[in-house]
Image (tube, rainbow, N blue to C red):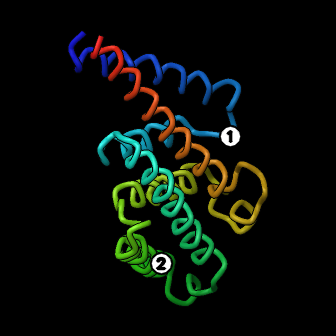
Amino acid sequence: MNPLTATSLSIAIFGAIATWMALSPLSGFVLIWAIFIAWAAFAALGADITAFKNTVICGLFGVFIGWVGAISFVALPFAATLGVPLWAAIVVAITAFAVVFASNISLFGAVPASVLSYAATFAYLMQTEGKMSVGTLTSSSFENPLLIISLSVILGAVFGKLSTDVAGRVSAS
């Protein structure tokens, strides 16, 4: 089978499995869109074992920095004096700088995975009323992005690796 067909079929099959898992047994523990974001980061980083490692490490780093930004935004009192838009812009400026500047450390060098996971963290927090709160951000439940987005990132990397491995085997046969 040609590589494009093998890759397309593998992604279709594993995408269906990931979707079923996210909407059924893992519902409330992972988000399918965050899984696909991490899967895309894995592909963009080269779709190999190094990409897997970098997607997980830098993805989790991006989630953590996003969480730090969110907790800073809601817990520090500057929104009242500076206004929400300015305070949000300052928080994003500082944390976005940190995400990219950390790539000076080779462990955090996969900027696409860090930035995509950072963005996924804010997308999750802002998509539903009440998520951007100290209660959510300090919760030990899977409402906390440190848990739900992190697990989604890890699963995205796993599904990316599985789909690539299967596609490689099928196209080689």
Identify the amino acid type marked 2: Val
Q: Residues within 10 Å of mark 2 (few under 14, many from 20)?
A: some
Left or right: 142, with 103 as reference point: right
Left or right: 7, with 113 as reference point: left
**Residue at 52% over, 69% down:** 65
Who is closer to the viewer here, 131 or 141? Answer: 141
| SS class, disc 1 | loop
**Residue at 44% over, 34% down:** 161
Left or right: 22, with 116 as reference point: right
Quadrant of res 112: bottom left
Left or right: 173, with 166 as reference point: left
Q: Nearer the viewer, mark 2 or mark 1?
A: 1
Who is closer to the viewer here, 55 or 129? Answer: 55
The quarter in which the C terminus is drawn is top left
Q: Residues within 10 Å of mark 1 (few under 14, many from 20)?
A: some
Who is closer to the viewer here, 109 or 136? Answer: 109
Residue reaching furthest to the front: 173
| Residues tagged 2 and 1 counted as in contact (Cβ below 8 A) | no
Q: At which x and y percent is residue 98?
A: 42, 76
**Residue at 63% over, 53% down:** 129
In the depicted structure, whether residue 164 falls above or below residue 46: above
Q: Which residue is mark 1?
A: 29
Give how far apart the Cα atoms at labels 2 and 1 are. Answer: 27 Å
Identify the amino acid type marked 1: Phe
Quadrant of res 31: top right
In the depicted structure, whether residue 83 falls above or below residue 124: below
Q: Which mark is residue 91?
A: 2
Q: At which x and y percent is residue 97?
A: 37, 77
Residue reaching furthest to the right: 140
**Residue at 47% over, 41% down:** 157
| SS class, disc 2 | helix
Q: At which x and y percent is residue 169?
A: 35, 18
